[in-house]
Amino acid sequence: MAHCAESRRVRRDLDKQLAASAAASGRPLVWSAQDRVVLDLISTQIDRKNELFADRAVADDMKIRVKISAELRLLEASIARLLKQVSTEVPRPMSRRSQKAQAAALTRWNHGA
């Protein structure tokens, strides 16, 4: 399904931010599987928001316009929450302590196998 211009623009901007972070860090960065799902949800909700804007513009009944406006506010809040879940920053490296703990856990797991 093709997304609306606004959702394509948001995705393009997020891709640019990820590319800028990758260039700044000198490492290639890609979207994780979770990020791709969230990005698709964002695009779908932006599409729905645009459909509701169009519906509200042609709605004659004030009750319907109020209901559509309430749905639009909920969608905008949901989009904002989803955008907070997507990070274009370089992941922080694991601390030495975490590396040691991970190595110890892997040793325990591999020793029993």
Image: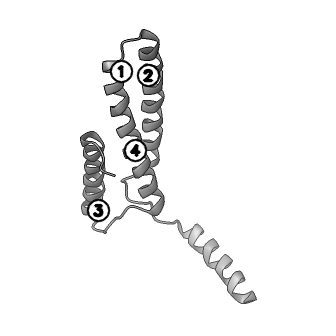
Q: Is residue 26 above or below residue 73?
A: below
* Circle 2/circle 1 CB separation < 8 Å: yes
Where residue 101 sits, quadrant-wise, is bottom right
Amino acid carrying mark 1 in the image? Arg
Q: Is residue 41 above or below residue 33?
A: above
Q: Earlier in the sequence, mark 1 or mark 3?
A: 3
**Percent coordinates x, y for residue 47 in the rendering:** 35, 39
Amino acid carrying mark 3 in the image? Ala
Q: Earlier in the sequence, mark 4 or mark 2?
A: 4
Q: Residues within 10 Å of mark 3 (few under 14, many from 20)?
A: some
Q: CA distance from mark 4 to mark 2?
A: 17 Å
Where residue 26 sits, quadrant-wise, is bottom left
- The residue at the point 36 percent across, 53 percent down is 88
| Mark in the foreground, 4 or 3 | 4
Q: Secondary structure at mark 4?
A: helix
* Residue at the limit of the structure toward the top, as seen here: 62
Q: Earlier in the sequence, mark 4 or mark 3?
A: 3
Q: Is residue 21 left or right of residue 81?
A: left
Image disc number at residue 68: 2
Q: Which residue is mark 4?
A: 44
Where residue 98 sits, quadrant-wise, is bottom right
Q: Is residue 35 above or below residue 96?
A: above
Q: CA distance from mark 2 to mark 3?
A: 40 Å
Image disc number at residue 22: 3
Q: Earlier in the sequence, mark 2 or mark 3?
A: 3
Amino acid carrying mark 4 in the image? Thr
